[in-house]
Image (spheres, rainbow, N blue to C red):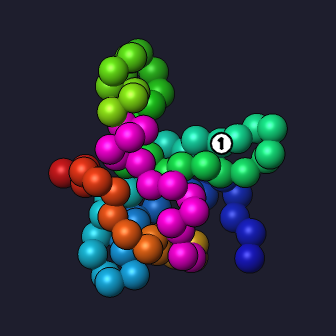
């Protein structure tokens, strides 16, 4: 099954144990490989976030796409990120 990148934005994220994590606010891509690298629980767009905030979001409020078990009506992941978005 394939999805458009734009369809990921706003999707709810749950662990495979039915724990709600948050929703996809941003997506990090590897353009060289043409693949999704991370799903972010906070937006990285605009002038709202800079420097250290970007680093924190990527490290603490993002899910590696390797952890994604399935994408359908929701995103299922193997485990929650270190810090969950409130």
Residue 25 shows up from this direction? no
Looking at the image, residue 28 sits to the left or right of residue 5; the answer is left
Q: Position of residue 31 (x, y in %)?
A: 76, 38
User: Front-most of 51 and 42?
Assistant: 51
| Residue under the image location 45 percent in, 21 percent down | 46
Residue 47: within the magenta?
no
Bounds of the magenta segment: 57-70
Relative image position of residue 37 (x, y in whole percent): 61, 49
56 sits left or right of 40 in the view: left
Q: For the N terminus, which image quadrant?
A: bottom right
Which of the 4 quarters of the picture holds residue 50? top left
- Residue 65, above or below 70: above
Q: Residue 58 lies in magenta, yes or no? A: yes
Secondary element type, mark 1: strand
Report x, y in % for residue 63.
45, 55
The image shows residue 12, relative to residue 44, as above or below, that is below
Q: Which residue sits at x=56%, y=76%?
A: 70
Residue in the image at 65% along x and 51% along y: 36
| Res. 46 in view | yes
Query: Where is residue 17 drawn, in percent x and y?
Result: 32, 84
Above or below residue 6? Residue 44 is above
Q: Name which residue lies at 28% across and 54% down.
A: 82
10 left or right, relative to 33: left
- Residue that carries the numbered disc 1 in the rendered image: 29
Residue lying furthest bottom in this view?
17
* Image quadrant where residue 51 sits: top left
Q: Residues within 10 Å of mark 1 (few under 14, many from 20)?
A: some
């Amino acid at each position: 099954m394939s999805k458009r990148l734009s369809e990921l934005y706003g999707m709810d994220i749950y662990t495979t144990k039915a724990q709600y994590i948050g929703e996809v606010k941003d997506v990090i891509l590897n353009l060289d490989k043409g693949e999704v690298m991370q799903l972010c629980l906070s937006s990285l767009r605009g002038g709202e976030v800079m420097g250290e905030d970007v680093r924190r979001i990527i490290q603490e409020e993002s899910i590696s796409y390797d952890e994604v078990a399935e994408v359908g009506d929701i995103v299922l992941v193997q485990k929650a990120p270190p810090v969950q978005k409130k």
